[in-house]
Image (cartoon, rainbow, N blue to C red):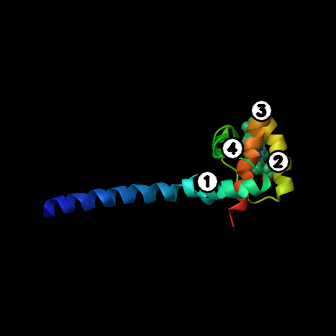
């Protein structure tokens, strides 16, 4: 009986260790844990009603995918929003985003900004 408890607690601590390692590798600006995405979705919906989680996830994958072909992930929280939108206008062309992809990226960036402070 004692053995089972020991094995179970070892398994639990391994699981916990893996989870905390995963959390530590994601930075604030690129966080994509479910709870931060939930907060982002709530924030985005005050600006862009009816935004779906699917759209935010799409924006996130563009941000970590197409947007990193020429440079790393850029911190979207260091610019004023109008300046960021100007930059995205230029970068969306560079990344050859469709209008829909660009919109998802903008929503994702707005969500990250709104929940970063
Ligand atoms: C074809 C290459 C290319 C792609 C794709 C690209 N960028 Fe850039 N980006 C650049 C270059 C070149 C610069 C200027 C040099 C630098 O800051 O690294 C830049 C700069 C930036 C900056 C800093 C601008 C400033 O004035 O401080 C941001 C933010 C940015 N990119 C975001 C994005 C986002 C978001 C995407 C995806 C939509 C993207 N980039 C896709 C080439 C690219």
Q: Residue placed farthest to the front in the image?
A: 50
Cα distance between the residues tagged 1 and 3: 23 Å
Query: Quick check: which quadrant has ligand 1?
Result: top right
Q: Earlier in the sequence, mark 3 or mark 4?
A: 4
- Which residue shows up at 26% across the image and 62% down it? 9
Q: Which of pointers 1 and 3 indicates the residue nearer the eye?
A: 1
Residue 35 visible in the shown view: yes
Quarter placement of the N terminus: bottom left
Q: Quadrant of residue 14?
A: bottom left
* Label 3, label 4: how far apart the Cα atoms are: 20 Å
> Pointer 2: what residue?
87
Picture residue at 73% right of the left edge, 54% below the top: 44
Vertical side of 50 occupied by 99: above or below: above
Q: Is mark 3 within 8 Å of ligand 1?
A: no
Residue 83 appears in which quarter of the rendering?
bottom right
In the picture, which quadrant includes the C terminus? bottom right
All told, the count of numbered labels is 4
Q: Secondary structure at mark 1?
A: helix
CA separation, marks 2 and 3?
16 Å
Residue at numbered disc 4: 71
Tag 3 near tag 4, CB within 8 Å: no
Mark toward the viewer: 2 or 1: 1
* N-term-proximal mark, 2 vs 3: 2
- Give the residue at mark 3: 98
């Amino acid at each position: 009986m004692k053995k089972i408890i020991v094995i179970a607690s070892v398994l639990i601590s391994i699981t916990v260790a893996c989870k905390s390692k995963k959390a530590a590798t994601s930075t604030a600006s690129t966080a994509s844990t479910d709870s931060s995405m939930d907060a982002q979705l709530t924030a985005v919906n005050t600006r862009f009603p009816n935004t779906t989680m699917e759209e935010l996830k799409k924006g996130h994958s563009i941000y970590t995918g197409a947007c990193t072909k020429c440079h790393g992930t850029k911190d979207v929280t260091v610019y004023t929003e109008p300046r960021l939108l100007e930059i995205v206008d230029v970068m969306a062309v560079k990344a050859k985003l469709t209008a829909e992809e660009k919109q998802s990226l903008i929503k994702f960036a707005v969500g990250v900004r709104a929940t970063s402070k």
